[in-house]
Amino acid sequence: MKVYFPQWQGAGIGKGIEVGAKTILNYLENPDFIEIPLSTIPAGINGVQKYNINNFEAIIEQLSFFKQELENKHPKTIQTIGGDCGLEIVPVSYLNSIYSNLGVIWFDAHADINRPCDSASCNFHGMPLRTLLGEGELKIEKLLFSKLRDHQVHYVGLRDIDVAEQERLDKGAIYHPRSLDIPDFIDTLKAKSITHLYLHFDFDCLEPSDYDKTYYQVQNGVTTTEALSCIKALQEQFTVVGSSVLESITTKREELTPIVPIIDALMKP
C-alpha cells in the first residue's frame, strides 16, 4: 500500500512540511499513492493545545482517517510520503501487529521519544516513539494497533537529544550509536532475531551540507552516501515491510536531486 499523508500539524506551525511532501509525490508520478485527507479543524497559528500537545484535535482526526484506511485494506506493506514524524504511530503499530519480529529503524536527528509533559515544544512529531512504546497520551494511544518494546527501536543519525529523552534511551538500552557502523548494525539486528523492518526516514538525519531542505537542520549528520548504503544493506539482509520519507520542505523538484536515490530506494520497490 502506498500512502501520501502530508500531515504537518504535528510540527506545530510547520505547513512547509505539507508542501515538501507534495514535491516528493509529484517527483514520483505514481498514481498508486492514495491520499489521507487532512483535518479541517483549525491548527497552526489558530490551533488549540490539549494534553500538552499542539493541534491535538486535528491530529487525532486525521490519524483516525489513516487508521481506518488500514483497517479497510489490510495491507501487508506500507510506503508513506509525509508529512511530520507523528504520523508514524499508525503504520508502525499496524505492521507491528502483523509481524511479530519487527525492527523499527529510525533515521532521524531527533529521538522523537518525549512524553507530552517533557516536551518543550509540545509538538507531537517529537513524541511518536514514546507513544508507540505505550508511554504517551492515553487518548492518542487508542489509535495504536499494537505497542513496541524497547529492543525493537534502533536509531541512525541521532544527535539532538533532550535530557528526558536521553534518560529514556539509557533506561531501555535502546540502540543509538554515535556513528554509523553498518556491519555492527546488521549483527545487532540479527542477534535479536529480527527479520522484518520498518524504515522511518526523516531527512534531517542527513548532514545539512548534503541536504538542507529539512524542517530542522542539525550538523554532523550521516551523508547521503552513508544513508543509502545503510538502506541497501538493510534491504539485502532483511524483509522491509514499511518505509517512509518525511519532513522535507523543498518546493522545487531540482532541489530533490541529492536525495532522489534515497527516495527511490524507499518508495519505488
Image (cartoon, rainbow, N blue to C red):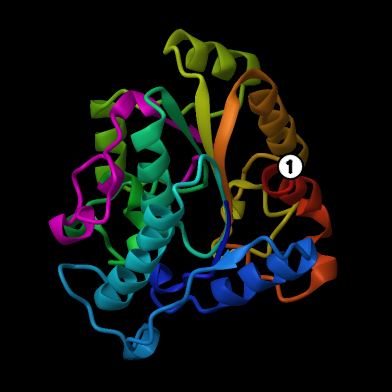
Residue 185 on the magenta segment = no
Q: Position of residue 101 (x, y in %)?
A: 41, 22
The three-letter code of the residue at mark 1 reads Ala
Q: Position of residue 45 (x, y in %)?
A: 37, 88
Residue 251 shown left or right of residue 108 in the figure: right
What residue is at 33 percent from the left and 71 percent from the top? 59
| Residue 124 sits in quarter | bottom left
Residue 116 shown left or right of residue 267 in the figure: left
Residue 261 shown left or right of residue 111 in the figure: right
Q: Nearer the viewer, residue 91 or 117?
A: 91
Q: Position of residue 264 (x, y in %)?
A: 76, 48
What residue is at 38 percent from the left and 44 percent from the top? 94
Q: Is residue 177 above or below residue 194?
A: below
| Residue 13 sits in quarter | bottom left
Q: Residues within 10 Å of mark 1 (few under 14, many from 20)?
A: some
The residue that mark 1 highlights is 265
Q: Is residue 135 above or below residue 195?
A: below
Residue 145 on the magenta segment = yes
Quadrant occupied by the C terminus: top right
Q: Position of residue 205 (x, y in %)?
A: 58, 47
Which stretch did the figure color magenta?
131-160
What residue is at 42 percent from the left and 54 percent from the top? 70
Is residue 163 visible from the viewing direction of this image?
no
Q: Secondary structure at mark 1?
A: helix
Is residue 264 visible from the viewing direction of this image?
yes
Residue 237 shown left or right of residue 95 in the figure: right
Q: Is residue 93 above or below residue 6?
A: above
Q: How many marks?
A: 1
What residue is at 49 percent from the left and 69 percent from the top? 36
Q: Nearer the viewer, residue 131 or 269?
A: 269
